[in-house]
Image (cartoon, rainbow, N blue to C red):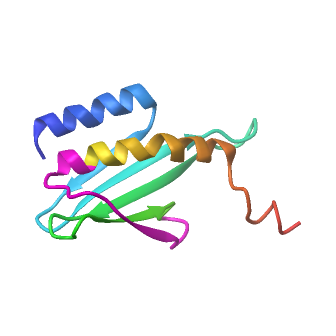
């Protein structure tokens, strides 16, 4: 990965407080964002994750996995053409603030909210 891409990631991490890891492979690109979710006092802090995966030959389709280590829920978004990982990373960064805000609210449904 180019040094400019790594600098872009580091700047976004510093500005937003979101931890980012990016992978640039021959056939795919991925961006994984971990957003710290602060639970109630006395409990362990949790991370909300979002992973975006695409590739140079994917016709601008992006696979989006929310909390990929917890659930298999995913969605596919179609975007304008992305020729480099830098363009892909910038588009992922545009999406992360909304997901961070949703993570701060916590789940709207799920065990403990509709199971009780």
Q: Residue at 31% x, 59% y: name it.
A: 79
Q: Position of residue 51 (x, y in %)?
A: 40, 58
Q: Position of residue 29 (x, y in %)?
A: 22, 59
Q: Is residue 3 left or right of residue 66?
A: left
Residues 100 and 22: in front is 100
Residues 68 and 46: in front is 68
> Is residue 45 among the parts visible in the rendering?
no
Considering every residue shown, the one lying at the far front of the view is: 80
Residue 76 magenta-highlighted: yes
Image quadrant where one finds the C terminus: bottom right
The answer to whether 74 is drawn above or below residue 100 in the figure is below
The answer to whether 67 is drawn above or below residue 73 in the figure is above
Considering every residue shown, the one lying at the far right of the view is: 116
In which image quadrant can residue 3 be found?
top left
In which image quadrant can residue 107 be found?
bottom right
Q: Is residue 64 left or right of residue 21?
A: right
Q: Is residue 1 left or right of residue 70?
A: left
- Numbered circles on residues, count: 0
Q: Residue at 20% x, 65% y: name it.
A: 55
Q: Position of residue 21 (x, y in %)?
A: 31, 48
> Is residue 11 among the parts visible in the rendering?
yes
In which image quadrant can residue 2 be found?
top left
Image: magenta residue range: 69-88
Q: Residue at 21% x, 70% y: name it.
A: 58
Q: Position of residue 16 (x, y in %)?
A: 44, 31
Q: Residue at 31% x, 63% y: name it.
A: 53
């Amino acid at each position: 990965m180019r040094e400019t891409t790594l600098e872009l990631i580091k700047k976004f991490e510093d500005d937003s407080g979101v931890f980012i890891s990016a992978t640039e492979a021959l056939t795919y690109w991925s961006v994984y964002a971990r957003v710290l979710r602060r639970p109630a006092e006395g409990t362990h802090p949790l991370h909300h994750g979002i992973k975006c995966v695409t590739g140079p030959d994917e016709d601008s389709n992006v696979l989006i996995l929310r909390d990929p280590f917890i659930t298999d829920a995913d969605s596919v978004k179609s975007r304008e053409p992305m020729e480099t990982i830098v363009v892909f990373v910038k588009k992922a960064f545009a999406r992360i603030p909304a997901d961070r805000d949703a993570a701060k609210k916590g789940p709207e449904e799920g065990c403990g909210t509709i199971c009780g």
